[in-house]
Amino acid sequence: GVKPYACSMCDMRFFQRYHLARHTLTHTGVKPYACTMCDMRFIQRYQLERHSLTHTGVKPYACTMCDKR
């Protein structure tokens, strides 16, 4: 398929304008999602959500080889 949205700073191309806008943040250094528990900041919300688990003690991912989380 044709990816009509091209990054002006690298060779990446995207199907949707939103994906290009999100990608552009990797070049600008802007990290709009801040952790309220520490000084970490993130480009995407899901990164902040995953990071937040380090503060809560919740370990939702189980090892497929043993019982550890």
Image (cartoon, rainbow, N blue to C red):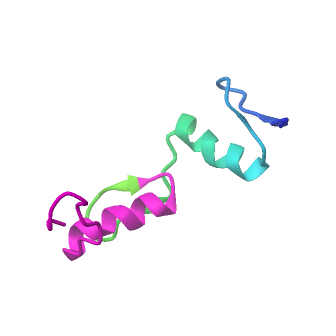
Query: In the rendered view, does 45 fall on the left or right side of 17?
Result: left
Judge whether 4 appears above or below 50 on screen: above
State the quadrant of the N terminus: top right
State the image coordinates of residue 32 (x, y, percent, origin top left). Answer: 51, 57
13 or 8: which is nearer to us?
13
The stretch of residues the image draws in magenta is 42-69
Judge whether 56 appears above or below 19 on screen: below
State the image coordinates of residue 57 (x, y, percent, origin top left). Answer: 19, 74
State the quadrant of the C terminus: bottom left
Query: In the rendered view, does 22 fall on the left or right side of 41?
Result: right
Residue positioned 23% across, 65% down in the render: 54
2 or 43: which is nearer to us?
2
Q: Is residue 64 magenta?
A: yes
Residue positioned 29% across, 66% down in the render: 61
Query: In the rendered view, does 26 fall on the left or right side of 16?
Result: left
Judge whether 43 appears above or below 45 on screen: above
Q: Is residue 56 magenta?
A: yes
State the image coordinates of residue 53 (x, y, percent, origin top left). Answer: 28, 69
46 or 66: which is nearer to us?
66
Task: Count every numbered label the image shows and give the total.
Answer: 0
State the image coordinates of residue 58 (x, y, percent, origin top left). Answer: 23, 75
